[in-house]
Amino acid sequence: MLIGCPKEIKPQEFRVGLTPAAAREATGHGHAVIVETGAGIGAGFDDDAYRAAGAEIVASAAEVFARAEMVVKVKEPQAVERAQLRRGQILFTYLHLAPDPDQTRDLLASGVTAIAYETVTDAAGTLPLLAPMSEVAGRLAPQVGAWALQKANGGRGVLMGGVPGVGPAEVVVIGGGVVGTQAARVAAGMGADVTVLDRSLPRMRYLDDVYRGDFKTRYASAEATADLITRADMVIGAVLIPGAAAPKLVTRAQLATMKPGAVIVDVAIDQGGCFETSRATTHQDPIYEVDGIVHYCVANMPGAVARSSTIALGNATMPYMIALADKGWQEACRADAGLLAGLNTHEGQLTNAAVGRALEIDVISPALVVKG
């Protein structure tokens, strides 16, 4: 199979979909790899590193899209990229379709077979291709939130760990999954007073057993959420429903109950965000204010640490990419129900039920698609 990797064009996105190590693995399996010149520079991989791995460097993204049988990316294809996709081609990347009707329509119109990293599952039912970036985003969230809390950036002017005689910042993390756990670990490590809200009692028991009081847990009732955000200096949104739009857990009216200059970090923004007032921002212009509350809603947070993120993502995606190339997408999906769960579109048909519910589009079962 001819595998292609274009340079990412989303603003301030420095990650790359294919590492030299993954290119070497693919060529070792007898596949051909083409990479747009400069695609890996932001992550610290120059063209020579790809050439040494057996890849061909091409001059433009247009050539990648025109030639490649499988296009491997990081972020969802932008409009100019979607226009170059075609029937019979595989797209392997993050998609986050539920809050993005325009992208969904374009992918369906193109006929491309699109497999989304964020809906691939493993034998345990977890999300192995989302987890690495969730870990990165979770660990970044308190870091960027601490920056936003600085008075010069519109925040309350509160130091995360406080100082002797001055209490630490109060941080509330909504969601105790991968993102929330990593966010709580880092915020607690910075000295903040951290509470994690979750609705899974087994998960809260796990957090309590493993982290032994580094942070507190509370059941995520509407009452508890409303109470805690009134005292919080920072609220981190870390709620995920795989493939679906994130639930809105804090309303605009509730912002009036929060401390002026408090900070919201919405890590769920790729799926539409879990605050009613959230809208996607970029690393170039990351924050905005609504009713005195600072919002940080960058939709590609891991892009800020592009090298670490690229290597972590490449480690996770490589085996799936090789399976798709070795077996073809149909056989690979027949052999792996978790990979089949990643199938979102095929030849103009939507194959993810959560996306269909969010966008009110008819869905066909992916199991029927792979049967032909």
Image (cartoon, helix red, strand yellow):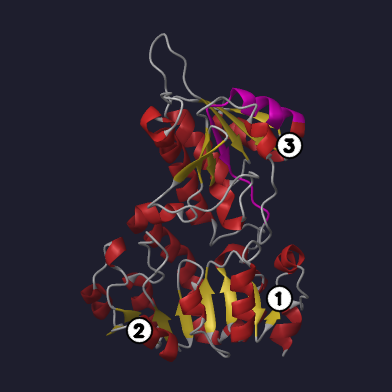
Q: Nearer the viewer, residue 136 or 209?
A: 136
Q: Residues within 10 Å of mark 2 (few under 14, many from 20)?
A: many
The residue beneath circle 2 is 34
Q: How many marks?
A: 3
Q: Is residue 201 above or below residue 230?
A: below
Asked if the residues shown at circle 1 and circle 3 are in contact, with their CB atoms under 8 angstroms apart, the answer is: no
Residue at x-position 72% and y-position 28%: 224
Q: Is residue 223 toward the left or the right of residue 232 in the image?
A: right
Q: Residue at x 43, y 23 (%)?
A: 158
* Label 2 – label 1 distance at C-alpha: 29 Å
Q: Are marks 2 and 3 in contact (CB under 8 Å)?
A: no
First in residue order: circle 2 vs circle 3: 2
Q: Amino acid at mark 3?
A: Leu
Can residue 53 be seen here? The reply is yes
Instruction: Identify the residue position indicated by label 3 in the image.
Output: 201
Q: Secondary structure at mark 2?
A: strand
Bounds of the magenta segment = 223-241
Q: Of callouts 1 and 3, which one flags the residue occurring earlier in the amino acid sequence? A: 3
Label 2 – label 3 distance at C-alpha? 48 Å
Circle 2: residue type:
Ile
Measuring from the top left, give residue 153's x and y in whole percent.
39, 35
Determine the residue positioned at 59% across, 72% down.
103
- Residue 318 in the figure: left or right of residue 269: left
